[in-house]
Amino acid sequence: MHVMEPTDLWQRYIDPEFRDRAPRRLDERRWDIRTLVEGEIMAQIPGGDWPAETGAEEKALAERYAEEIARNFDPESQIKAMDKEGLDLAILFPTSAMYVTAFTRMDARFAAAACRAYNDWLHDYIQAADPKRMFGAAAISAHEVESAVAETRRAVAELGMKAIFLRPNLYNDRPWHDRYYDPLWAACQELNVPVGFHETTGSRMKASGADRFQSLGIAHISTHSMEQMLACMDVIMGGVMERFPKLRFAFLEGQCGWLPFWLGRMDEHY
């Protein structure tokens, strides 16, 4: 389940050293997930003709979430949304925070600070809502493995997070099976926290199919499924799951119809 971050989250929570560069979720529209990061507006592909770009989807979502928008997506509105859907428990994933590290290459210290700020805010948000029903997936930047391990340990030990979130795209063009990441996988296995891969469209990372179309809709269709497929193949064929047999991965919001034939393809080539 996603949360919708407040527009001033990073201005309030990021380390003072980075406050002048703090990311910001835009609020120029009734429904706006666009996020300003390092001078780039994320979550948009200009010139597209999909409903998201023409305003039709924005209008529909604004009507669907009118009550939550009126409450500025506060903790109580999250609880009410869970009740409407019949959800007893939820693992909370970010919206804007999915974009704050969404560059193939970026300042690793800034990326880590942006994740720490989100994780601190998410902890406070859950405490204000219902920590017996809501649990957090910590945002982790993989631009530098040492800081990724440190934040994973902090988020679990100090903030009570139950999972970590990573983008399936490649940070610094480094595949997930690269042994550079083994300290992160080892920490997750030791802490018994799953890794949740979740793609977003309109980032500044290399994403399957995104370079072919000037449409957020078509890019969304391709990137969300294909990046999950590639990440899944990466950790299986690259031996990550053999080196860390108790490590758990979740491949989120990319559907799962591809899994049977994809596993079959891997079996053919293993």
Image (cartoon, rainbow, N blue to C red):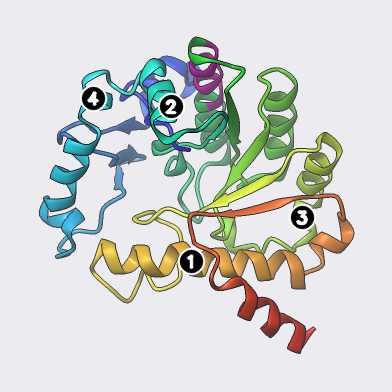
**Residue 159 coordinates in the image, percent (x, y):** 66, 19
- Rounded to the nearest angstrom, the CA distance separating label 3 from label 1 is 25 Å
Q: Nearer the viewer, mark 4 or mark 2?
A: 2
Disc number lying in front (3 or 4): 4
Q: What amino acid does circle 1 point to?
A: Ser
Residue under label 1, please give it: 225
**Residue contact between numbered discs 1 and 4, judged by CB atoms under 8 Å:** no
Residue found at x 69% / y 53%: 249
Residue assigned mark 4: 67
Q: Position of residue 45 (x, y in %)?
A: 24, 58
Q: Give the class, few, some or many, for how many residues have Cα within 10 Å of label 1's Cα (few <14, many ≥20).
A: many
Q: Quadrant of the C terminus?
A: bottom right
Q: Are marks 1 and 2 in contact (CB under 8 Å)?
A: no
Q: Is residue 185 left or right of residue 85?
A: right
Mark earlier in primary sequence (3, 2): 2
Give the Cα distance between marks 3 and 2. Answer: 42 Å
Alpha carbon distance from label 1 to label 4:
31 Å
Q: How far is mark 3 from mark 4, CA to CA? A: 45 Å
Magenta-drawn stretch, dominant element (helix, strand or loop)? helix
In magenta segment, residue 123: yes
Near-viewer residue (221 or 210): 221
| Residue at image coords 28%, 21% | 72
Outermost residue, bottom side: 268
> Which badge, 4 or 2, is on the more N-terminal residue?
4
Foreground tag (1 vs 2): 2
At mark 1, the secondary structure is: helix
Question: In this view of the protein, can residue 206 be seen by the observer?
Answer: no
| Mark 4 surroundings within 10 Å by alpha-carbon count, few (fewer than 14), some (14 through 19), many (20 or more) | some
- The magenta region covers 119-127
Badge 2 is on which residue? 83
